[in-house]
Amino acid sequence: MPLPFFYTEYTSSAGAVVELDDATARHVNQVLRMKTGERLCVTNGKGQKCIGVIEEQHKNGCTVYIENEADVPAQQPRITIAISLLKNASRFEWFLEKATETGINSVVPLICERTERSHFRYERMKSIVVSAMLQSQQSWLPELTEPVHFKEWISKAGSGNKYIAHCLDTEKHILTGSALARDKIICIGPEGDFSPAEIDMALHHQFKPVSLGNTRLRTETAGIAAAILLRIQ
């Protein structure tokens, strides 16, 4: 049976003693009712995976002695999904959870011309990503940025295989996981799709127009479909 898996922001090494944050310590002590001497797993979300043993417990605290540590390589190539915020925040949260489970590397929340909602609770969203990382037993926490306007982001999107999924009836390629050696970036638009001007802007910056299939998908579903298609080898 897998050891209980927890997150800490700090890098550790064999022989070190780690103080768990208050929320994690309460979960260990009060929810799981773990005891001194029991073993658990800790990751810093940057590829380090440590096995440790509970050394000391008190009301809202818990220290862990690190027995050994290992470095887990990040999934390659890197996959970045730049996706519009949604009017229904719970749908965006669902996307973050499921996309993290698939092993994506980065999420960029976009504010597009037709985005209906721009409010973004970063700490809540990050906690969802952390929980999904732990649930799926991963050691790399996807990078989550603050929301950015599409026009500001598109010219700084980096290199690699760059795609934009949209609904206009124009020539598009079927999205696949080809060209595996290069990083991949895909843009997913809001409920009302990208505007023609935004699509033209993406094409100007060497984004390839792609289709995710024969049915019209909700934004969050499109994001998950893209994450899976780009990871297929």
Image: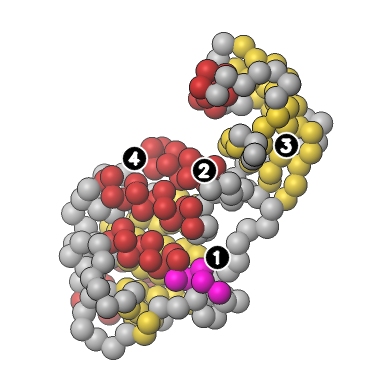
Give amino acid for label 3. Answer: Ile
Q: In terms of depth relative to the viewer, which is nearer, 21 or 145? A: 21
Image quarter of residue 32: top right
Residue sitting at 48 percent across and 53 percent down?
Answer: 101
Q: Is residue 227 above or below residue 93?
A: below
Residue 54 screen position, x and y as percent: 70, 23
Q: Is residue 39 above or below residue 169?
A: above
Counting residues from the N terminus, which is met first, the one under dot 3 or under dot 1? 3
Kindly report the distance in space between the C-alpha atoms of the residues bearing marks 2 and 1: 21 Å
Residue 199 screen position, x and y as percent: 27, 76
Residue of label 3: 51
- Left or right: 8 in relation to 12: left
Kindly report the distance in space between the C-alpha atoms of the residues bearing marks 3 and 2: 17 Å
Kindly report the distance in space between the C-alpha atoms of the residues bearing marks 3 and 4: 32 Å
In the rendered structure, find residue 197 and report the number of the disc placed on it: none
Residue 26 screen position, x and y as percent: 53, 20
* Disc 4 packing (10 Å; few <14; some 14–19; many ≥20): few
Q: Nearer the viewer's eye, disc 3 or disc 4?
A: 3
